[in-house]
Image (cartoon, rainbow, N blue to C red):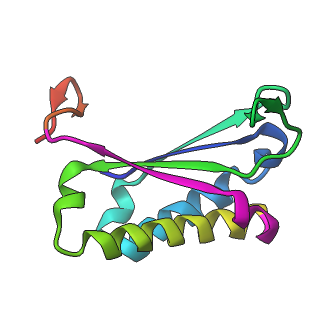
Amino acid sequence: MPHLTVHALEGDLAGREAALAEALTDSIAAVYGEWARELVTVQLIGVAVGRWAVGGRLVETASPAVTLAVREAMFARPDAEERIRQLIASLTDATASVFGEPSRARTTVELVATPAGRTGVGGRPEE
């Protein structure tokens, strides 16, 4: 189940939540296929100005930071390198479509692998 977490400055995120959730979900479905759409979970986290730093200095502007948590097995697929490139490009495109083209150059995307059995739903580990 793809889990996306996006950190963005609160003022940049305000009013764009629905568009961003839709764009990110569309980007996952474009890479994985339509079957994945209903499984995508998106968490949008607004960060107040004065609570985001780059290079040790607080900033007043920042591009979004996107984290995609996927099962570790995705990285063992024969097409993993291509899939990784597609995901990073697609998620960056999605955020730029919502936050504007100037955000593209500094948007970060991190893919995080979770080993089988290390996630759970309803109190039970997923296989």
- Pick whichever, 11 or 77, lies toward us: 77
Q: Would you place residue 35 above or below residue 21 in this image?
A: below
* Rendered residue at 10%/42% (across/down): 127
Q: Position of residue 10 (x, y in %)?
A: 78, 38
**Residue positioned most to the right:** 60
Position of 47 with respect to 122 (left or right) is right
Could you say where residue 74 lies in the image, as x and y percent from the top left?
A: 23, 59
- The quarter holding residue 51 reads top right
Question: Looking at the picture, does residue 126 appear above or below residue 51?
Answer: below
Query: Where residue 107 sits in the image (x, y, percent)?
Result: 66, 57
Q: Residue at x 24, y 49 (%)?
A: 71
Residue 38 shows up from this direction: yes
Q: Which residues are magenta?
A: 100-116
81 and 49: which is toward the camera: 81
Examine the rendering and report whether any part of residue 32 can be seen.
Answer: no
Q: Position of residue 12 (x, y in %)?
A: 81, 48
**Is residue 103 shown above or below 114?**
below
Q: Residue furthest front?
A: 55
Q: Where is 9 relative to 98, above or below?
A: above
Residue in the image at 74% along x and 54% along y: 16
Write down the quadrant of residue 105 in the picture: bottom right
Left or right of 49? Residue 22 is left
Residue 82 magenta: no
